[in-house]
Image (cartoon, grey):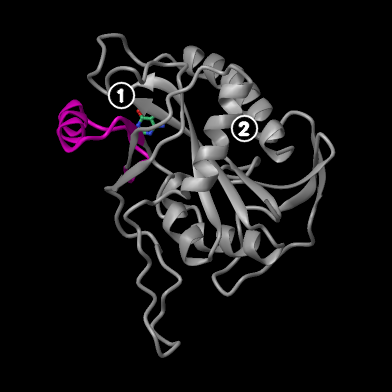
Amino acid sequence: MNLLGVVGGTGMDTLPDFSGSEQAPIETPYGAPTQAPVVGQIAGQPLVFLHRHGQVNPTPPHLVNYRANVHALAQVGVTHLIGVNAVGGIGLPMHPGALVIPDQIIDYTWGREHTFEAGNSGQIQYIDFAHPYDQGLRQQLIETARELALEHVDHGTYGATQGPRLETAAEIRRMQRDGCNLVGMTGMPEAALAMEAGIAYASVCMVVNAASGMDDRPLSLDTIVEILQRESGVVGTLIAALAHR
Ligand code: HPA
């Protein structure tokens, strides 16, 4: 692995044991990233961290400048990128508290700037997105989780919704029929943009709630926060060990 980057999601302002300093504000041809990438070290290994929503005045999922974020990470030399996502679980075994390394995506988002392809290079880039996540990086995450004896699910289909509202119960039933196991608002277009930029990309999902209609309990913010706190520590341990490989 040349240079590992992490895009932290909701509940992950930084990584445990990570220290670094923000690069000078970076401009990209696509505008400003949510924050300048923070270049530093985790457990003695180089790592770049970027908060997807930003710590102050968080940017909602549909307004995140995914192109600027991915471009800024590429500019500082990131070659391998882990997107950390808080998600809802659709059925078993995606119960609240589960850690999942998904292998597929269905994209339900709309109206987002979703490609670097502007049709001005003389040749259109049609990325092969059959396997949206980098298989090698996924495998390394799975092996690391196994070595650390971290409970995890090693596959699953991530359904990316537009947000910021949560889904209706009928929308979730439709997603389940489509084959989705997870629902989140930020997995796309990040994964496709990383592939276009030539960055190996994988996702680690923390299930923080049962998706709408999947259980009769109302959403509890306290439970979500509690799971996020616990799981982001676990994800930090996983990433520190991954950086050591
Ligand atoms: N739906 C969409 N995004 C989410 C959810 C959900 O239930 N939980 C966390 N992010």
Q: Which residue is mark 2?
A: 12
User: What crowding class fits label 2: few (fewer than 14 Cα within 10 Å), some (14-19), or many (20 or more)?
Assistant: many
Residue corresponding to mark 1:
211
Distance between the Cα atoms at labels 1 and 2? 21 Å
In the image, 198 versus 108, the foreground residue is: 198
State the image coordinates of residue 158 (x, y, percent, origin top left).
34, 38
Residue at image coords 50%, 58%: 194
- Part of the protein shown in magenta: 161-183
Q: Earlier in the sequence, mark 1 or mark 2?
A: 2
As for residue 56 lying within the magenta part, the answer is no
Q: Residue furthest top?
A: 217
Q: Is residue 160 above or below residue 33?
A: above
Whether the residue carrying mark 1 lies under 8 Å from ligand 1 is answered with: yes
Disc 1: CA contacts within 10 A as few (<14), some (14-19) or many (>=20): many
Q: Position of residue 6 (x, y in %)?
A: 63, 44
Q: Secondary structure at mark 1?
A: loop
- Tell me which image quadrant ligand 1 sits in: top left
Q: Position of residue 70 (x, y in %)?
A: 56, 59
Q: Is residue 1 visible?
A: yes
